[in-house]
Amino acid sequence: MAYFRKRDNGWEYRISYKDITGKYRQKSKSGFKTKKQAELEANKIEIELSKGFQINNNIEFCTYFKNRSELYKKPNVTATTWDKYNYTLSKIKGYFDKAKLSSIKPSHYQKFISDYLNQYNWQTIKMINTHIRQSIKMAIHEGYITKDFTAFVVLPKPDDSNVDSKFLELSEYQKLISETSNEVKYKSHFCIYLI
């Protein structure tokens, strides 16, 4: 329940509630010009509390991602996959540093994907985006934020310019067959015929 009082700098609301651990907490804010403004703001907070949202909006994006990954991913993934999550965390730290989870907007995230990660290949960008999106969905579910800032991100298109260089042309393949058919003393030469 919210309590209101007039102060020197305007109206203040104070809300008492129990957090998820059962401890009593208080949330207050002052500086409202009218009591009605304070009531409207307090009502929004009380609605969020009734829906299970966390009032602690001060958690940093890096901290949340690290804590969530250690709790949900580390015990359930291989060492290689865990290294990938740590890699994603390093990129989050490098760009967002101490940014609060609740302060990140879709435009900030798009800039992170477009500008900061532009030197990486498409698969790496896709992996980082997937890790972050999983984390943000959990943050919404846990009530730390209400909107998914990753929802409408536009990933860069994969670079298909090197696709042709990965495969042999027919003439190159025929030359390879003729060169290896002269001496089939290695198993690798024999494997070419199987293809």
Image: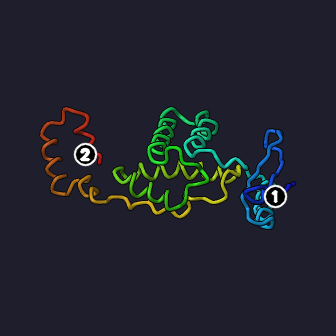
Q: Position of residue 28 (x, y in %)?
A: 76, 51
The one nearer the camera, 10 or 181, is 10
Relative to 172, 81 lies left or right: right
Q: Select label 2 or label 1 by which is in front.
A: 1
Q: Position of residue 133 (x, y in %)?
A: 56, 53
Relative to 169, 140 lies left or right: right
Picture quadrant where residue 158 is located: bottom left
Question: The residue under label 1 is which amino acid type?
Answer: Lys
Colour option used: rainbow
Q: Position of residue 101 (x, y in %)?
A: 59, 50
Work out whether mark 2 precedes mark 1 in sequence or the reverse, and give the earlier one: 1
Residue found 27% across the figure and 56% down from its top: 162
Badge 1: residue crowd in 10 Å (few <14, some 14–19, many ≥20)? some
The one nearer the camera, 150 or 191, is 150
Relative to 89, 37 lies left or right: right
The residue tagged 2 is 193
Q: Is residue 182 above or below residue 50?
A: above
Residue found 44% across the figure and 54% down from its top: 112
Query: Considering the numbered disc 2 on the image, is that residue within a helix, a strand or a loop?
Result: helix
Badge 2: residue crowd in 10 Å (few <14, some 14–19, many ≥20)? few
Question: The residue under label 2 is which amino acid type?
Answer: Tyr
The one nearer the camera, 59 or 85, is 59
The residue tagged 1 is 6
Query: Considering the numbered disc 1 on the image, is that residue within a helix, a strand or a loop?
Result: strand
